[in-house]
Image (spheres, rainbow, N blue to C red):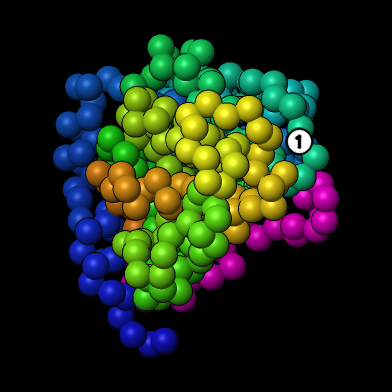
Amino acid sequence: MGQDPPVRMSDLAVWEGTFDPQVIDEAFKSYNLTIATTVFAVGKYTRFLRDFLLSAEKHFMVGMNVQYYVFTDLPGDVPGSMTLGVGRRLKIVKVPKFGRWQEISLRRMELIQTAIEEYIHQEAHYIFCLDVDMRFHGRVGPEAVGKLVAAIHPWFYWYPRNQFPYERRNVSTAYIPLDQGDFYYQANVFGGAMEDIHRLTKTCREHLECLPLSRASVCPCPVDKSVGVEALWQEESHLNWYLLRNKPTKLLSPEYVWDDLRGSGAKEIQLVRFSSVIKDNAEVRENI
Ligand code: UDP
Ligand code: GAL
Ligand code: MN
């Protein structure tokens, strides 16, 4: 502790001061892009939607076209009276509620994959997939747009790679050996061009569903809990496996995926843009 974060982290990512917001906004205006934004609010997580959306309207891709997709089992709990900015729309997608919080979380890969295939690919140019238990506090704009975008986890960027919380059991399809890996990414935020995120979600979904040593592309077996190797951090472990082999073209600093639990003391963070709120897991999750 007390050390500066490693250079391999600091130099490559998007940080405050590494871009000129006005220049970027001006450049992107002429592209007239639509950004699909998926957010899941299943069960008690609908309580996070209002603040998530209100803060997104203030800070997320302001001036661009944004198509929100709210995936929920409780459409009646989606805040109805919100006025969205010009060019911004919200669609509610009804989804089933799985019994375990882990499965609710990891099934997002499959649901996003099929939604991209069925309609999102026609409705937007880029897509961002976000956790709902979060709030925007600062600008997240087109500087974050790229072909394959991922964000560095706020709790691990100063650790050596052998201490990243990757899946370490080699029977898992998410296995990463101790001497591999550049960054530990948090699954709360990822995004990119439609075909890139389609490939990412499809690959993660297949790995989540397949028996550990079978790499068949279509696999009839249920989620890997049936064979006892649900990865340590579910889809986040699979995301990290994928991003090791398909390096993000845009790397977001932890400014873009902060955690309120870490507070505001970190000297390398000039601006918290998007942060997880503190929640009582035992209260909001289904099965604990
Ligand atoms: N989620 C949900 N309902 C649940 C559990 C999870 O809607 O019962 C969705 C929600 O979008 C949440 C995401 O899955 O933000 C990831 O779960 P969670 O935020 O609990 O994981 P953490 O960020 O705490 O690891
Ligand atoms: C936690 C976070 C989890 C997961 C974990 C990885 O701080 O809440 O979602 O990313 O870190 O160790
Ligand atoms: Mn979360």
Give percent across and percent down for residue 274.
47, 51
Residue located 57% across and 29% down the image:
219
Q: Which residues are magenta?
A: 260-288
Residue located 23% across and 72% down the image:
7
Give percent across and percent down for residue 153.
45, 60
Residue located 46% across and 47% down the image:
239
Badge 1 marks a residue whose secondary structure is: loop
> Residue 160, located in which quarter of the rendered image?
bottom left
Q: Is residue 115 above or below residue 206?
A: above
Q: Is residue 275 above or below residue 242?
A: below
> Residue 124, located in which quarter of the rendered image?
top left
Characterize the magenta stretch by its predominant secondary structure: loop
Give percent across and percent down for residue 199.
39, 30
The residue that label 1 is drawn on is 98
Q: Is residue 176 magenta?
A: no
Instruction: Please rate how many residues cluster around mark 1, counting C-alpha atoms within 10 Å: few if below 14, some from 14 to 19, many from 20.
Output: some
Q: Amino acid at mark 1?
A: Phe
